[in-house]
Image (cartoon, helix red, strand yellow):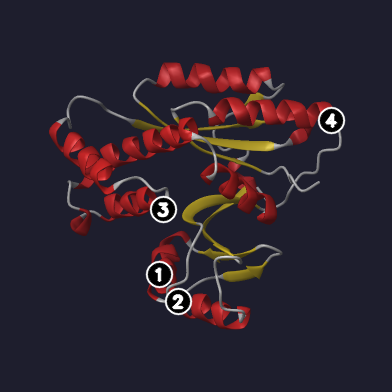
Amino acid sequence: MSGHSKFSNIKAKKEKNDAAKGKIFTIIGREIAVAVKEGGPDPANNSKLYQVVLKAKANNMPNDTIERGIKKASGELGSVNYENITYEGYGPGGTAIIVKTLTDNKNRTASNVRSAFTKGQGSIGTPGCVSFMFDEKGQIIIDREEYEAEDADELMMTVLDAGAEDFAEQEDHYEVITAPEDMENVRKALEEAGIPMVSAEVTMIPQNYVTLTDENHIKCLNRILDILDEDDDVQAVYHNWDEQD
């Protein structure tokens, strides 16, 4: 997902209907369950849970829903076991796709992911077949409309001083790139400075992007992405298609 389209996708997802919001809440609910199981129910002493709670708030999940999720996970630690599984494969036109899932039924998830690739004329590959084409990075997006200060240089110095690796000024947003382990420090610095963020997450950024010119390839790749987006087991999908073209 390239800069502009990545931002557009984020905004579009935030503006989707209640069904989409329900999908996001399902994803976050599972992440809460896993975080509680791994480190306990107190966000102050469980950094992973703390990150999930921040993500929940960024997606406008009500506080009582968050607290309910933590209590439920605390009381049902033995009832459901979620497993992180990553799939890698190829989409039309030589595009690379990474699918990260969190599931309590890996056979169901594997079947669904494989079906999504097949329906879009893609194919599942072996672990590591495309991940080398991506870099794991912290990515923070700031909407230019919401950031009222006009001095981009001042914003750049704020994030670089906090430990960011890169700062890019786009037409409608600013993009901040960090090492995964530094993202939280940079996010906190922006939060303390009162700078609103559209998103702050560890993501997979393509080293190079693929341009698709064949309309059938574009249609098929969108089919893969749409099917995966509707699957509750799918936490995140990364690809190297340059959607601007």
Residue 218: mark in rendering: none
Residue 162: mark in rendering: 2
Q: Position of residue 24 (x, y in %)?
A: 43, 38
**Mark 2 or mark 1: which comes first in sequence?**
2
3 and 2 marks in contact (CB < 8 Å): no
Picture residue at 47% right of the left edge, 54% below the top: 201
Mark 2 crowdedness (10 Å alpha carbons): few <14, some 14-19, many ≥20: some
Question: Tag 2: residue type?
Answer: Ala
Residue under label 4, please give it.
215
Q: Nearer the viewer, mark 3 or mark 4?
A: 3
Mark 1 crowdedness (10 Å alpha carbons): few <14, some 14-19, many ≥20: few
Mark 3 secondary-structure assignment:
helix
Residue under label 1, please give it.
191
Q: Nearer the viewer, mark 4 or mark 2?
A: 4
Q: Position of residue 112 (x, y in %)?
A: 52, 19
Mark 2 secondary-structure assignment:
loop
Mark 3 crowdedness (10 Å alpha carbons): few <14, some 14-19, many ≥20: some
Q: In 3D space, how far apart are the residues under numbered discs 2 and 1 (Cα atoms)?
A: 12 Å
2 and 1 marks in contact (CB < 8 Å): no
Picture residue at 62% right of the left edge, 78% below the top: 152
Between 55 and 165, the one lying in front of the other is: 55
Q: Nearer the viewer, mark 3 or mark 2?
A: 3
Residue under label 3, please give it.
58
Question: Tag 3: residue type?
Answer: Ala
**Mark 4 or mark 2: which comes first in sequence?**
2
1 and 3 marks in contact (CB < 8 Å): no
Where is 149 relative to 94, above or below? Answer: below
